[in-house]
Image: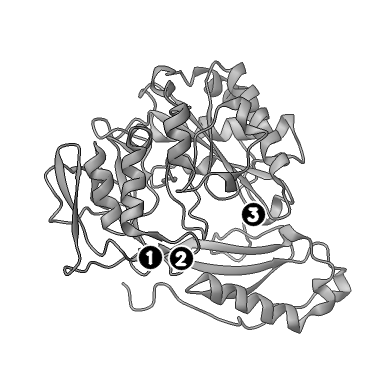
Amino acid sequence: MSPSRSDAVTVEAAGHEVRVSSPTRVVFPEPGLTKLDLVRYYLSIADGALRGAGGRPMVLKRFPKGIDAEPFFQKRVPENHPSFVDTATLHYARGTSAEEAVIRDAAGLAWVVNLGCLDLNPHPVRAEDLDHPDELRIDLDPMPGVDWAQIVDAAFVARDVLDDVGLVGWPKTSGSRGIHILVRIAPRWTYTQVRLAAETLAREVENRAPGLATARWWKEERGESVFVDFNQNAKDRTVASAYSIRPLADARVSTPLAWDEVRACRPEQFTVLTVPERFAAIGDPHAGLDDAVGTLDGLLALAEELGPAEKPPRGSSGDGRRQSVMPLIEVARTKTKPEALEALEEWKARHPGPVSHLHPADVLVDGMRGSSSLWYRVRVNLQHVPEDERPAQEDLIADYDPWEGRT
């Protein structure tokens, strides 16, 4: 979705004219959606999208080469941004800062789409108070082998925990395989306190539904369960907000739901082609979200009751790095996901015997955040392979270094 001056069009939104370059470029070949179609989609559901992303600093996740190539993450707002796009400067723990974009109206939505953004990735704070989140985010992330019914069951356990501590959860599809639950809170607590509250909720969900859900941070220890990802509440994290288009072939959308819809629906029902009609017919199921502001007192009291979370074991090599309790081997590090999957298939072809013992959750293909884009690490957990059949750690099939040439 790189710009082209020859065929640009102008759209009107919120009293502003927004230039859209390369409007006829096909972004989603399967449903035949162009860049201009995506702009029109966001304008049709602008009220809902702005409820999730408006007034918040956001990371620009740009897909200049389309959905089949890796995006890059741009924290700093372009210098030539229009006057209707505000900014806010975020300071990070490592001493860096970034002046990020803040959109407040439909024109801002059209502008970010023209830059090549598909999903919206706002921080959980308002631009007026960057140190105190007003949103607690529960990300129910299924491990391989987990079906939709199990994710839904975990969501209702999370709702029960929220009810018990006096909070209201608002569910939405993640736009991929999982479910997000959003909780509006008063902006009184720091990021550290909000993350602790989220971790406490995750631990309590695991306590109530062991085997169904897990709060274990290390992926190889989760098994075939739903990970309640509390770390999405860390200061440097963002998640795709409501009505975001996800980079899947069917142009799937992260869609707000009412609780009585959760069990019957499926994520693939909600796409750029179907959501505008739904929005026009029933409105936004999250319309009351901003009126349901709660307190973290209950979750923080529960944190005291549960005590400190178990710390992961550390290695004995002297470098302070964690040593996994699982028999892990690393297969590859690659620049792109297709390369990662190709390396995985090569490893499987080398070791057909051990592969026959693997469970779905034993194969770990992780997107790792680099300086401005993702890279991929492939590992295999040999826990289900008999010890005398476990292959040794070999040279990596691919060994991409995302920091090569950087200081």
Dots 3 and 1: beta carbons under 8 Å? no
Give the amino acid type for the residue marked by disc 1 in the picture.
Answer: Val
Residue at 51% in and 61% down: 249
- Which quadrant holds residue 365? bottom right
Coordinates of residue 120 in the picture (x, y in percent): 37, 47
Regarding residue 370, the answer to whether it shows in the image is: no
Report the side of 374 relative to 99 (left or right): right
Taking 327 as reference, is 55 left or right?
left
Q: Residue at x 53, y 80 (%)?
A: 399
Residue for badge 2: 29
Disc 3 residue type (three-letter)? Lys
Q: Position of residue 159 (x, y in %)?
A: 61, 25
* Residue 8 vs residue 207, the one in the foreground: 8
Which residue carries the number 1 mark? 26
Which residue is disc 3 drawn over?
Answer: 219
Q: Residues at badges 2 and 1 in contact (C-beta under 8 Å)?
A: yes
Q: Earlier in the sequence, mark 3 or mark 2?
A: 2
Is residue 157 in view from this perspective? yes
Label 3 CA crowd tier, 10 Å (few <14, some 14–19, many 20+):
some
Give the Cα separation between the discs numbered 3 and 1: 36 Å
Residue shown at 67% from the left, 36% from the top: 152
Amino acid type of disc 2? Pro
Q: Earlier in the sequence, mark 3 or mark 1?
A: 1
Element on which disc 1 rests: strand
